[in-house]
Image (cartoon, grey):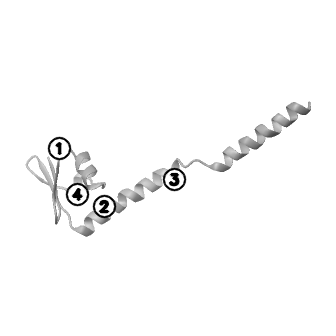
Amino acid sequence: MFYAITKNELYTGKTLKDINKKLNAILDVNEFRRLGNNYIINLTDDDINFIQDTKKMSKIMVQNLFKKSDSTSWLIYIIIGLQLILLLKG
């Protein structure tokens, strides 16, 4: 079990993925202290803000990798229009 202790609440999850979903963050197993079969982390408000910001920043980087460019779609429309004009003229 994974436990995240904050000032206001105790978050529990069977897996690290559950804790990350509940906190809306990205945590690593190495950040937790292991007590038997359990993993425990104590977080302050600043820690929570930091790990949530790192998740947001990693999402931005991934989104920029797969960002669709609008200029290529306009170029394709122009080429199709020119070919249609050439087809009708010829």
Q: Which residue is mark 4?
A: 31
Q: Which residue is mark 2?
A: 51
| Residue at figure coordinates x 23%, y 54% from the top left | 30
Q: Which residue is mark 3?
A: 64
Q: CA distance from mark 2 to mark 4?
A: 11 Å
Identify the amino acid type marked 3. Answer: Asn
Q: Nearer the viewer, mark 2 or mark 4?
A: 2
Q: Is residue 80 left or right of residue 9?
A: right
- Judging depth in this view, the residue of 5 and 39 nearest the camera is 5
Q: CA distance from mark 1 to mark 2?
A: 20 Å
Per the image, label 4 sits on a secondary structure element best described as helix
Per the image, label 1 sits on a secondary structure element best described as loop
Identify the amino acid type marked 2. Answer: Ile
Q: CA distance from mark 4 to mark 1?
A: 16 Å
Where in the figure is residue 20, as x and y percent of width and height? 27, 51
Q: Are marks 3 and 1 in contact (CB under 8 Å)?
A: no
Which quadrant of the figure has residue 54?
bottom left
Q: With respect to residue 1, does 5 lie above or below?
A: below
| Residue at figure coordinates x 26%, y 46% from the top left | 17
Q: Which residue is mark 1?
A: 14
Q: Residues within 10 Å of mark 2 (few under 14, many from 20)?
A: some
Between disc 4 and disc 1, whose residue precedes? 1
Where in the figure is residue 25, as x and y percent of width and height? 30, 55
Between disc 3 and disc 4, whose residue precedes? 4
Per the image, label 2 sits on a secondary structure element best described as helix
| Residue at figure coordinates x 87%, y 35% from the top left | 86
Q: Nearer the viewer, mark 4 or mark 1?
A: 1
Q: CA distance from mark 3 to mark 1?
A: 32 Å
| Residue at figure coordinates x 61%, y 49% from the top left | 69
Which quadrant of the figure has residue 78?
top right
